[in-house]
Image: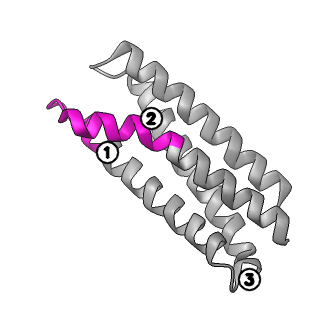
Amino acid sequence: MENKVIYAIASYAVVIITGFVLSKYGKPFNTLVLTAHKLLALAAVVFMVIVIREHWAVFKGDMVSVTAAVFTGIFVTAMFATGAMLSFEKPAAKIVIAVHKALPYMILVTGAAVIYLLKKHG
């Protein structure tokens, strides 16, 4: 589990960094940075899903752990959706931008809770 968690955290960190780069330079987005951003986001999700699936039995009966995992999944899904809207040529609504900027912090909190609870129970 250790390596997969480290890979997920490292991928997430690079996603945040590339997101700041994309935000700083604005549209038109650099294709290489945007592609790296999207692929690393997907990699981070895959690593976390693998870790959670491998240890799902640990969460059995613990509603706090299940809730943290579910909210993390909801936030990640919203992050992908708002990111897709931002990558369109047409400018996104301000609410989409605001939500996309807030979600990484929400994912950080709930994702950290999931990792902590996995360590605590496992």
The Cα–Cα distance between marks 2 and 3, rounded to whole angstroms, is: 35 Å
Left or right of 109, for residue 99: left
Instruction: Find residue 122 and report its horizontal and vertical position in percent.
Output: 85, 71
In the depicted structure, whether residue 108 falls above or below residue 25: below
The three-letter amino acid code for the residue at tag 1 is Thr
Q: Nearer the viewer, residue 75 or 63?
A: 63
Q: Nearer the viewer, residue 43 or 75?
A: 75
Residue 57 got which mark? 3
Read off the residue under disc 1. 82
Left or right of 79, for residue 112: right
In the depicted structure, whether residue 25 falls above or below residue 48: above
- The residue drawn where x is 32% and y is 51% is 81
The Cα–Cα distance between marks 3 and 1, rounded to whole angstroms, is: 32 Å
Give the structural element (helix, strand or loop) at label 3: helix
Instruction: Find residue 110 and report its horizontal and vertical position in percent.
Output: 59, 54
Read off the residue under disc 2. 35
The Cα–Cα distance between marks 1 and 2, rounded to whole angstroms, is: 16 Å
Q: In the image, is residue 98 part of the stretch drawn in magenta?
A: yes
- The residue drawn where x is 62% and y is 54% is 111
Considering the whole magenta stretch, tell me its main secondary structure.
helix
The three-letter amino acid code for the residue at tag 3 is Ala
Q: In the image, is residue 73 part of the stretch drawn in magenta?
A: no
- The answer to which of marks 3 and 1 sits earlier in the sequence is 3
Numbered range of the magenta stretch? 84-105
The three-letter amino acid code for the residue at tag 2 is Thr
- The answer to which of marks 1 and 2 sits earlier in the sequence is 2
**Mark 1 residue crowding within 10 angstroms, few (<14) / some (14–19) / many (20+):** many
- The answer to which of marks 2 and 3 sits earlier in the sequence is 2
Q: Nearer the viewer, residue 86 or 103?
A: 103
* Residue 119 picture quarter: bottom right
Left or right of 10, for residue 89: left
**Mark 3 residue crowding within 10 angstroms, few (<14) / some (14–19) / many (20+):** few
